[in-house]
Image (cartoon, rainbow, N blue to C red):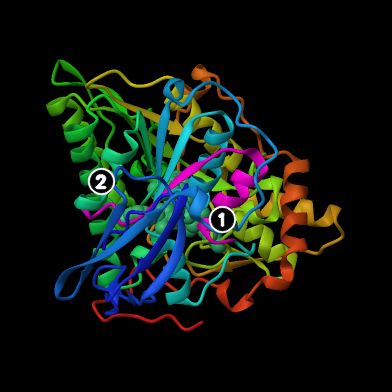
Amino acid sequence: MAHFISTSCSLNISSSCTKPQHLLRNQNSVRFSASFSLRTAPFASEKLILHCKGPRGFSTINAKAVSFSQESKTEPASSVPPKGGESADRKKVMVIGGDGYCGWATALHLSNKNYEVAVVDNLVRRLFDHQLGLDSLTPISSIHNRIRRWKSLTGKDIQLYIGDICDFEFLSETFKSFEPDAVVHFGEQRSAPYSMIDRSRAVFTQHNNVIGTLNVLFAIKEFREDCHLVKLGTMGEYGTPNIDIEEGYITITHNGRTDTLPYPKQASSFYHLSKVHDSHNIAFTCKAWGIRATDLNQGVVYGVRTDETAMHDELCNRFDYDGIFGTALNRFCVQAAVGHPLTVYGKGGQTRGYLDIRDTVQCVELAIANPAQRGEFRVFNQFTEQFSVNELAALVTKAGEKLGIEVKTISVPNPRVEAEEHYYNAKHTKLVELGLKPHLLSDSLLDSLLNFAIQHKDRVDTKQIMPSVSWKKIGVKPKTLAA
Ligand code: NAD
Ligand code: USQ
């Protein structure tokens, strides 16, 4: 299904397209009301066509673009004038996955830094929550309200294209309409446990991620060959080898001959493997077509507030704490806040790179400001500190003590297949060389994260805390996880 919607004028859509339209291929379906109204960007033609791909092929919605002057006002006009130069001087950045955790914070940050920003997202992450009975710790506004609120606070427009990047027709139209100078690609299914629920989720994850990225590469080649791809990869692509992890490449001497080769990949979930496949496809197209690309092998992200998302409740970012989408440190803070023992899986020696979400947005900005050369496949390891799970649990326990909370830890049988005690030393100097000023996990930051979790603890569903997905028990039968 493709929707092609953007945010600077209104769309009045009426349609006979009342059949359920498939939002998530092979999974659930979503019914659109026959008539609705959205704020959208000006289009070349007055008429907008929405192609809806259903079980019986495409159906089409014709929508009429209504200019600003005709639309009913839903927001007060901004009192803050847009900063910076004329539109022609501003770099255009398309943020794919811009409604998600990292993407939303990044879209706002780049908009604040005077980039011209477009968010592309099919909102599938919100659908996963509905399907699995999960919810963000923080209440989050719709993407339309988020963008309207940003405009009303700052005077800055963010274009919005709702659609699936696996649909090449949709992606082509967004490229032709927005003409990006850089594409930041966050738009993937990013949970390792989600990819290990059952066969259909494993297939969905790899299809969504690999085909989506492949489409982005083709769109760049076809429509914007000079555009810089900044792709979110993951430190998990490398696994946990018993040698130092380099940034993307390793120089090896074998039988007297020396070469610099891609660093070996040993991913340990169908999700992490999708990132490995992406990296290979990107590397190949850099060589074959001269694409310029930066693969940001990001570690586990923690935190929630950035300068921009903290500006208003309606800009608040999502914060996942459940056993499927919640990541280690964020989960531990919520667990401590509600008096749940910290869930250390297995022996707890699993060591990973971590970073504050404020550094995610900084790293992406640095990558965009210093683009790769044509044909270059650049790899940066994007994290600031390494911790084992036991170390994180100890830090949260200490932070809890300071706030008068007694924090306990339990060892949960590890639902994953991973090394629980291992060597880990990953390089991460390239972003620092470009100017990254890391926000390290200080006591005060942990205090504020824990306080944030305490502030929202009434929204916690404690039934979502324990892990429910087993790497070994994954089967072919579709699984509906009980809420
Ligand atoms: P998220 O799930 O919160 O956001 C991803 C967004 O992409 C969602 O809004 C989703 O609706 C959208 N999306 C997914 N498939 C799409 C498709 N086919 N078409 C259009 N939109 C689509 O995830 P996140 O935590 O923000 O992660 C963003 C990226 O960063 C991912 O690629 C992830 O692998 C990577 N990453 C995240 C972390 C982390 O700790 N959160 C760490 C390392 C790497
Ligand atoms: N873990 C626990 N207890 C928990 C949760 C996690 O012990 O309650 C352990 C896991 O077993 C794992 C480690 O903590 O060893 C990290 O797990 P995680 O869930 O925080 O992160 P992970 O599954 O690796 O995935 C997250 C993001 C993913 C990103 C990845 C970066 O969801 O999108 O790619 O972090 S990295 O870990 O570097 O691959």
Q: Is residue 264 above or below residue 136?
A: above
Quadrant in the picture for residue 53: bottom left
Q: Where in the figure is residue 477, as x and y percent of width and height? A: 26, 81
Q: CA distance from mark 2 to mark 1?
A: 38 Å
Q: Where in the figure is residue 86, as x and y percent of width and height? A: 49, 22
Q: Is mark 2 within 8 Å of ligand 1?
A: no
Indicate whether residue 84 is drawn in magenta.
no
Determine the secondary structure under disc 1.
helix
Q: Sequence order check: which comes first, mark 2 or mark 1?
A: 2
Residue at image position (50%, 17%) is 433
252 left or right of 447?
A: left
Q: Where in the figure is residue 112, as x and y percent of width and height? A: 59, 33
Residue 35 versus residue 279: which sits nearer the camera? 35
Residue 351 showing in the rendered view: no
Q: Where in the figure is residue 123, as x and y percent of width and height? A: 42, 61
Look at mark 1 in the image and give the residue it sits on: 328
Residue 328 versus residue 136: which sits nearer the camera? 136
139 left or right of 97?
A: right
Q: Is mark 1 within 8 Å of ligand 2?
A: yes
46 left or right of 403?
A: left
Q: Which residue reaches farthest front?
A: 70
Residue at image position (46%, 74%) is 130
* Tally of marks: 2
Q: Amino acid at mark 2?
A: Glu
Quadrant in the picture for residue 258: top left
15 left or right of 244?
A: left
Determine the secondary structure under disc 2.
helix
Look at mark 2 in the image and give the residue it sits on: 173
Indicate whether residue 158 is drawn in magenta.
yes
> In the rendered structure, which segment of residues is drawn in magenta?
141-167
